[in-house]
């Protein structure tokens, strides 16, 4: 079992930046892939960005060029740098981790609110 704890959410004006961080309770070497998802009120949870153990990244079209995902295996953290934030980025952001055996873990979420 592993716990994922997100931090770094908050209220920011449009055009601003935030950095989300996800801390794992144990080594993340066993995670094949980690990622950030978000869920806005009344909408389904959607993929924001993922990163594999080899460092390959993938982004939702809506955040490409504005968000950067990174992982630090030594620190057991997953980060999401978010720049040029837009009101439509407002959502609860969740950290996700998946093992090679396809076990999946989620954090409790952190709120990001972007005001216009």
Image: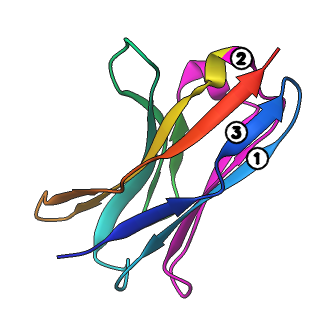
28 relative position to 111: left or right: left
Quadrant housing residue 31: bottom left
Labelled pair 1, 2 in contact (Cβ < 8 Å): no
Find disc 3 in the rendering and name its residue. 67
Tag nearer the camera, 3 or 1: 1
Residue 59: image location, x then y, percent: 55, 34
Query: Is tag 1's residue or tag 2's residue first in the polypeptide sequence?
Result: 1
Magenta segment boundaries in residue numbering: 60-87
Say what secondary structure mark 2 lies in: helix
Which quarter shows the N terminus?
Answer: bottom left
Q: Could you tell me how many numbered marks the image carries?
A: 3
- Left or right of 82 in this view: 13: right
The disc at residue 18 is 1
In the rendered structure, the answer to whether residue 86 lies left or right of residue 73 reads right
The circle drawn on residue 87 is 2
Would residue 66 be counted in the magenta stretch?
Answer: yes
Frontmost of labels 3 and 2 is 2
**Residue 32 horizontal/vertical position (percent):** 30, 63
């Amino acid at each position: 079992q592993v716990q994922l704890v997100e931090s770094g959410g908050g209220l920011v004006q449009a055009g601003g930046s935030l950095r989300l961080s996800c801390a794992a309770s144990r080594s993340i070497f066993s995670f094949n892939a980690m990622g950030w998802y978000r869920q806005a009120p009344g909408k389904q949870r959607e993929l924001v960005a993922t990163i594999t153990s080899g460092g390959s990244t993938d982004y939702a079209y809506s955040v490409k060029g504005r968000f950067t995902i990174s992982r630090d295996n030594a620190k057991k953290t997953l980060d999401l740098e978010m720049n040029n934030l837009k009101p439509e980025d407002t959502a609860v952001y969740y950290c996700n981790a998946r093992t090679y055996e396809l076990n999946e873990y989620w954090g409790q979420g952190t709120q990001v609110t972007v005001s216009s």
